[in-house]
Amino acid sequence: MSDPRITSSIFTRGAVDLSTLRGAAPASTRPGTPSQAGPSGGSPGTPAAGGDAPVVDVTEATLQAEVLERSMTMPVVVFFGAAGFPESDQFAPVLEQLAAEGGGAWVLARVDVQENPRIAQMFRVQGIPMVYAVVGGQPIDAFSGVVPEAQLRQWIGAVLKAAGVTVAEPEDPRLDEADDALMSGDLDAAERAYRKILADAPADAAAEAGLAQVGVARRVAGTDPRAALAAAEQAPDDVDAQLLAADIEVLSGLAEQAYARLVGLVRRTAGEDREKVRQHLVSLFTIAGPDDPAVASARRALASALF
């Protein structure tokens, strides 16, 4: 699943109408009053994990306070599941962990669909697990089924951004492991780790940059840098010599020099050689990322050289 989100038109068509649940809680019922057990056995309206994690179990009696009213001050992610269903049992702990990592920036509200069928009906839940984001008393996004953790992190980040919440993104431990493998010279392990991240999150810029670095490291392995640079100086139109020199310059912290070298080579070549140089230069851009000013400048120079 490349994008877990459902188009917002599902809401503009009136597929989710929460107005009938406003004020539905009996006057004697307040958040924190034990009643039915939720998907993981917690009490509705109370923290469900250790007392301080931003996770609550919700019933119809507490929906207004714990979801609708709470969403006026922070995003609420509503998880529809039921104990004993494999996908639901598998996905719930992932959401709970991310809620704990969120440090109070958002709240996870768990709804047991077997115990609360009316809430599931109001949200048009047709299968579990299903997840909704509620902001300002209204659903703004949703997805169904299990999605990879990296993709889920991106979705939650988008929800927070839509709600105007700014939070520091937690480090991905898989990325740390991949970087450690790269720094230690275990290029095979680093490549596997970066590719695994990209399988879950194809647009992960850090993993793309890491994979590009693996490629550079492989190409310069066993090379005498001084000799390679000298050879490139003596043969300015030798494509392979220039590409190797550019790799060495990037690894030496001279990325702008490498970009200029290859842009100049693009101007002097044609056909397959030119395309080879262009692709190599673009792969080097990936290491720095699109926001790097030197990359932006080199891209403009490359466009001028090509057209």
Image (cartoon, grey):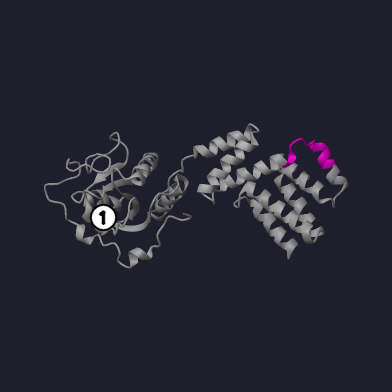
Q: Quadrant of the C terminus?
A: bottom right
Within 10 angstroms of label 1, few (less than 14), some, or many (20 or more) residues?
many
**Residue 231 appears at what percent x and percent y?**
85, 43
**Residue 78 appears at what percent x and percent y?**
31, 50
Task: Name the residue at the bottom extreme.
Answer: 13
Eyeballing the image, is 49 above or below 283?
A: above
The overriding secondary structure of the stretch rendered in magenta is helix
Is 226 in the magenta? Answer: yes
Q: Nearer the viewer, residue 188 or 29?
A: 188
Residue drawn where x is 67% and y is 50% of the image: 283
**Residue 233 appears at what percent x and percent y?**
85, 45
Task: Name the residue at the top extreme.
Answer: 184
Q: Nearer the viewer, residue 86 or 255?
A: 86
Is residue 29 rendered to the left or right of residue 283?
Answer: left
Q: Is residue 105 visible?
A: no
**Residue 131 appears at what percent x and percent y?**
35, 52
Eyeballing the image, is 240 above or below 171?
A: below
Is residue 71 rendered to the left or right of residue 210?
Answer: left
Q: Nearer the viewer, residue 126 or 296?
A: 126
Check disc 1 and give the amino acid type.
Ala
Q: Nearer the viewer, residue 125 or 274?
A: 125
Residue at which label 1 appears: 120
Eyeballing the image, is 76 above or below 252?
A: below
Where does the magenta region start and end? 219-230
The picture quadrant where one finds residue 244 is: top right
Residue drawn where x is 12% and y is 50% of the image: 27
Is residue 19 rendered to the left or right of residue 285?
Answer: left
